[in-house]
Image (cartoon, rainbow, N blue to C red):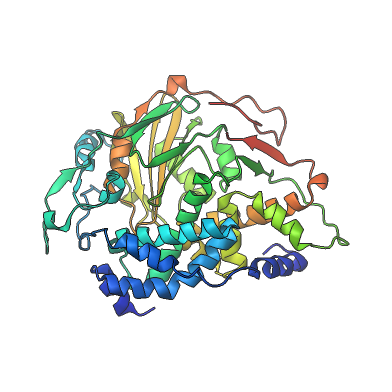
C-alpha cells in the first residue's frame, strides 16, 4: 500500500481512501468470510470495517501499518457481526490445561468435520485460526492485529486448535467442559 | 503449530476454500455511507496523565486531580464512540490546533451495566452491548487460562471492547503485585512491549486508589485496576484506535461503583483440576 495514499486518506481525502479500500477489500472480505462463514455477514463486516476505518483513520500513527491496522478493524467488526446476528455460540467450551487429546492416528480429517467444528468455536478462536492458517501471519503480527499481547496470541491459538480438535472428536473428549455464558 | 502435520495440512487446505474477492459493489456501498461522514483532522493531543507511580499518600491524593483530568477531553477524540451521532462537524474544530480546547465527554445518555457476580456497576455509551459473564474468576484460574475471555465482555460496533472482572485478593499480594501477576500470566502485557511500573499512572476508581496501565507500544489496550473489599477489580479495554489512553475509557472508569460486598465468591474446588462449571450472575 502506497504510504502517500494512506497519508492523504488520514488527512481526509476521500478519493485516496476509496483507492485504499479497493486495494484491501478483497483480502479483508476473504478473511471476514472465513471467520464468519457467511457471505452476507462477511460483506456487512467489510462495509462496517471501511466505515470505521474512515472514522478512526486519523488515530493511525504509522501509515506503514495501515494494512495491519485495518485488519484489526475488520476482526473487531467480525466480532460485532457475529454477536449482533446471534451467530456466535453462547456456549464457551473450555478445555482444562491438563487434558490430553486422543491422537487417533487412523483418523481421516474430513473437511465437513472441520467445518462443523469450526462453526462452534468462539469468534475469537475463529479469528486467530484464520489469521494463522489462512494468512499465515507470525504470532507477533497476529497479536498486533488482534490487539492482544503476544503471549495471549500464542495461548489463544493453542486453545483454538485444541478446541477445534476436541470438537472434531467429541465422543473421545469426556473432559470437555461447558460453561454457559447466556 | 498443532504438533500434528496432518491436522495443520488439513486445516490449511480447508481454510483456503472460499471466496477471495469481495462482492461487487461492497466498497461502493461503504463509500456511499462514508460520503456523509465528516472526519476531523488528525488528533494531536492526548489528555494529560501523570506518569510514575509509587504508593505515596500524596500520590493517592493526587489521583483525585487525575480523575478530574480523566473526564476532560478533546471534543474530537472518540466523538463517534461517545456520541451515537458520529463525530463533530469539522467547523467546530481548530484547523491547525497545537492547543485544542478540552471538553468533557457527554455521558448523559450512557447506560448502566451492573454485575452482581463481580460486584460493580459502571456506565457506558449506549452503543456498548454487554455480555455478562456467568463464570467465576480467580487469579489462579487466570494464570492457567488467560486465553479465555474473562469477566463481563462489553463490545461496541465502533471497535472498542471492554473486559471487566473482579477476583478475590490473595494474601500478601498488593495491587502492583496483582498487575505483575497478570503480566506474568501473559494476559496483560506482551514480552515485546513490557509496561514497566514507572509507566503506570495513578488514578482513583470510586474514590479508591488504583492504577492505569496503558500500552502505547504495539497493541491498543489499557487496563485500570483497583482493590476494594478484598477484591481486585480489573477494567480492560481493547480498541481499534492506535493508542488506548482514551477519554471514553477514562470516563467509564470514573463512573464505576464498586460493591465488593455484593460479589459472589467462587465455590471451593473439589479436586485438583476442578473449576466451577457454571453460575448465574
Q: Does residue B50 sit above or below B30 in this rendering?
A: above
Horizontal relation, residue B26 to residue A32: left or right: left
Which percent across, then down, holds residue A33? Answer: 56, 62
- Camera-side residue of B114 and B34: B34
* Residue A12, placed above or below residue B214: below
In the rendered image, residue B148, in percent from the top left (x then y), is placed at 57, 45
- Residue located farthest toward the top when viewing the structure as drawn: B261
Q: Quadrant of the N terminus of chain A?
A: bottom left
User: What is the quadrant of residue B267 in the picture?
Assistant: top right
Determine whether B25 is above or below A56 in the image: below
At 50% from the left and 26% from the top, the residue drawn is: B117
Q: Is residue B192 visible?
A: no
Q: Residue furthest right?
A: A106
Q: Is residue A10 above or below residue B196?
A: below
Horizontal and vertical percent position of residue A8: 26, 74
Quarter of the C terminus of chain A within the rendering: top right
Question: How far from the left and from the top, in percent, is residue B254?
Answer: 29, 35
Residue shown at 27%/68% (left/top)?
Answer: A10
Residue at the spot x=28%, y=44% of the render?
Answer: B82
Is B154 left, or right, of A168 in this rendering? left
Q: How many marks?
A: 0
Q: Which of the 4 quarters of the picture holds residue A52?
A: bottom left
Could you say which quadrant of the image residue B10 lies in? Answer: bottom right
Report the front residue among A30 and B206.
A30
Is residue B17 visible in the rendered image? The answer is yes
Does residue B107 appear left or right of residue B263 in this picture? left
Amino acid at each position: 500500500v502506497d504510504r502517500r495514499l494512506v497519508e492523504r486518506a488520514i488527512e481526509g481525502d476521500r478519493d485516496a481512501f476509496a483507492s485504499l479500500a479497493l486495494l484491501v477489500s478483497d483480502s479483508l472480505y476473504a478473511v471476514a468470510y472465513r471467520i464468519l462463514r457467511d457471505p452476507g455477514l462477511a460483506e456487512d463486516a467489510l462495509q462496517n470495517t471501511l466505515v470505521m476505518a474512515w472514522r478512526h483513520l486519523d488515530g493511525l500513527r504509522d501509515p506503514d501499518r495501515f494494512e495491519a491496522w485495518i485488519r484489526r478493524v475488520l476482526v473487531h467488526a467480525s466480532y460485532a457481526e457475529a454477536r449482533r446476528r446471534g451467530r456466535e455460540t453462547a456456549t464457551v467450551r473450555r478445555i482444562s490445561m491438563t487434558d490430553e487429546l486422543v491422537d487417533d492416528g487412523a483418523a481421516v480429517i474430513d473437511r465437513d468435520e472441520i467445518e462443523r467444528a469450526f462453526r462452534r468455536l468462539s469468534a475469537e478462536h475463529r479469528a486467530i485460526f484464520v489469521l494463522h492458517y489462512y494468512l499465515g501471519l507470525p504470532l507477533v503480527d497476529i497479536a498486533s492485529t488482534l490487539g492482544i499481547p503476544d503471549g495471549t496470541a500464542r495461548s489463544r491459538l493453542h486453545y483454538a486448535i485444541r478446541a477445534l480438535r476436541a470438537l472434531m472428536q467429541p465422543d473421545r473428549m469426556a473432559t470437555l467442559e461447558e460453561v454457559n455464558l447466556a | 503449530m498443532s504438533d500434528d502435520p496432518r491436522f495443520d495440512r488439513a486445516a490449511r487446505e480447508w481454510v483456503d476454500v472460499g471466496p477471495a474477492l469481495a462482492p461487487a459493489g461492497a466498497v461502493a456501498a461503504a463509500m456511499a455511507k462514508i460520503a456523509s461522514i465528516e472526519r476531523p483532522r488528525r488528533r494531536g493531543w492526548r489528555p494529560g496523565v501523570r506518569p510514575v507511580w509509587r504508593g505515596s499518600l500524596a500520590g493517592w491524593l493526587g489521583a483525585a486531580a487525575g480523575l478530574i483530568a480523566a473526564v476532560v477531553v478533546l471534543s474530537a477524540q472518540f466523538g463517534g464512540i461517545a456520541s451515537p451521532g458520529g463525530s463533530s462537524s469539522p467547523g467546530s474544530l481548530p484547523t491547525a490546533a497545537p492547543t485544542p480546547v478540552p471538553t468533557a465527554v457527554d455521558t448523559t445518555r450512557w447506560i448502566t451495566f451492573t454485575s452482581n457476580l463481580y460486584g460493580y456497576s459502571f456506565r457506558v455509551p449506549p452503543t456498548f452491548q454487554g455480555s455478562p459473564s456467568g463464570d467465576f474468576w480467580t487469579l489462579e484460574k487466570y494464570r492457567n487460562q488467560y486465553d479465555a475471555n474473562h469477566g463481563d465482555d462489553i463490545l461496541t460496533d465502533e471497535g472498542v471492547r471492554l473486559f471487566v472482572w473482579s477476583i478475590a485478593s490473595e494474601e500478601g499480594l498488593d495491587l502492583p503485585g496483582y498487575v505483575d501477576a497478570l503480566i506474568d500470566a501473559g494476559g496483560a502485557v506482551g514480552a515485546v512491549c513490557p509496561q514497566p511500573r514507572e509507566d503506570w499512572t495513578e488514578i482513583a476508581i470510586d474514590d479508591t486508589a488504583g492504577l492505569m496501565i496503558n500500552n502505547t507500544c504495539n497493541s491498543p489496550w489499557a487496563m485500570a485496576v483497583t482493590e476494594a473489599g478484598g477484591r481486585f477489580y480489573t477494567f480492560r479495554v481493547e480498541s481499534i484506535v492506535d493508542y488506548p489512553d482514551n477519554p471514553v475509557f477514562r470516563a467509564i472508569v470514573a463512573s464505576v461503583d464498586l460493591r465488593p460486598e455484593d460479589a459472589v465468591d467462587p465455590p471451593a474446588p473439589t479436586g485438583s483440576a476442578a473449576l466451577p462449571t457454571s453460575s448465574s450472575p
